[in-house]
Image: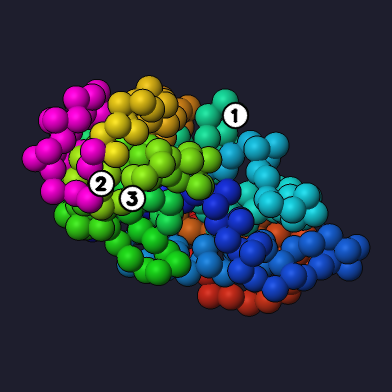
Amino acid sequence: MASLYLIDGSFELFRCFFGAPRAQRADGTEIGAVQTLFGTTLALLREATLTHVAVAFDDVNLLEAREPEDTALIHAQYDLARDVFAALGVTVWTMSGFSADDALATSAHHFDADPTLERIVICSSDNDFAQCVRGARVVLYNRIRRVLLNEAGVLQKFGVPPERIPGLLALVGDKSDGIPGIPGFGPKAAAAVLRHFGRMENIPLDIAAWQELNIRGREKLAATFAERRQEAIGYRDQGIKRLDAPVTRELEQLRWLGADRQRLEMLAQALEDESIGQRQIHLRDA
């Protein structure tokens, strides 16, 4: 089975930073996150179905944590994080003017038409990527929980099909993308409204039209939506992934051939970690 795995590098760096112990080089540079990132990426590359792979990073200036000190420590490991993927033979996209999310969505959309691929796996725990899922071909993989979502899984989890995910998150909110949502709308009510009426533009402003919906507080929700309709549409549009990011369009360029021996040696020196050279890692031909 030929499968393309698409990785959100910025997210992986963040989750390793907040989930791994701190560690420093001899010069005091923080490297704890990238040490862990190396191990988690190596584990992903051992997935039996992975044949092609790419990782996207946001512009470093857009990476912000809650605490300024954390932001500085993450920034300090940004270049090393990209070096980890490059050393392991993964194609690296560093975005400017587009987000890493846009890069992954663009690539998934583009290669969905490639008959030589059996599956495209978007590696992320962000709910908004559910909009990119298509059947059992383009799927969402939460590596933290080891949960794979196909289109049926999206419908079961969220109550709406993939194309309605931006609308759902516009109503209920999405902290990861700074979308506050519309007051009063919980996941079940929002899903019921979108299943019944479809696109947000088709949701009636007349409260009477909501009477056939079996949801609690429908009159108040109808009034709130009528008042804040344009705001909700704006949030939805904000959450729609772009499909025109500048990413590799030739599948063969994303084929994983193994790690780069020279880059691994340089990475081992940068991380002051001799164990890297002792790991069982498939190396590409010289």
Q: Which residues are magenta?
A: 194-219
Tag 3: residue type? Answer: Gly
Place of residue 221 in the rendered image (x, y in percent of width and height, measured from the top left): 29, 39
Could you tell me if the residues under marks 3 and 1 are in contact, i.e. CB atoms within 8 Å? Answer: no
Place of residue 133 in the rendered image (x, y in percent of width and height, measured from the top left): 27, 46
Along the line of sight, the residue nearer the viewer: 155 or 283: 155
Callout 2: few (<14), some (14-19), or many (20+) C-alpha neighbours within 10 Å? few
Tag 2: residue type? Answer: Gly
- Screen quadrant of the N terminus: bottom left
Callout 3: few (<14), some (14-19), or many (20+) C-alpha neighbours within 10 Å? some
User: Could you tell me which residue is drawn at 42 percent across and 31 percent down?
Assistant: 235
In magenta stretch: residue 213: yes
Mark sitting earlier along the chain (2/3): 3
In 3D space, how far apart are the residues under numbered discs 2 and 1 (Cα atoms)?
44 Å
Q: Is residue 18 above or below residue 113?
A: below
Q: Which residue is mark 1?
A: 96
Q: Which residue is mark 3?
A: 186
In 3D space, how far apart are the residues under numbered discs 2 and 3 (Cα atoms)?
11 Å
Mark 2 lies on a secondary structure that is: loop
Colour pattern: rainbow
Frontmost of labels 2 and 3 is 2
> Residue 185: which quarter of the image?
top left
Place of residue 75 in the rendered image (x, y in percent of width and height, measured from the top left): 74, 48
User: Could you tell me which residue is drawn at 38 percent across and 50 percent down?
Assistant: 127
Tag 1: residue type? Answer: Ser
User: Could you tell me which residue is drawn at 61 percent across and 69 percent down?
Assistant: 19
In magenta stretch: residue 171: no
**Viewed as shown, does residue 266 lie left or right of 11?**
right
Frontmost of labels 3 and 1 is 3
Q: Which residue is mark 2?
A: 217
Q: Residue 187: tell me if it is visible.
A: yes
Along the line of sight, the residue nearer the viewer: 32 or 47: 32
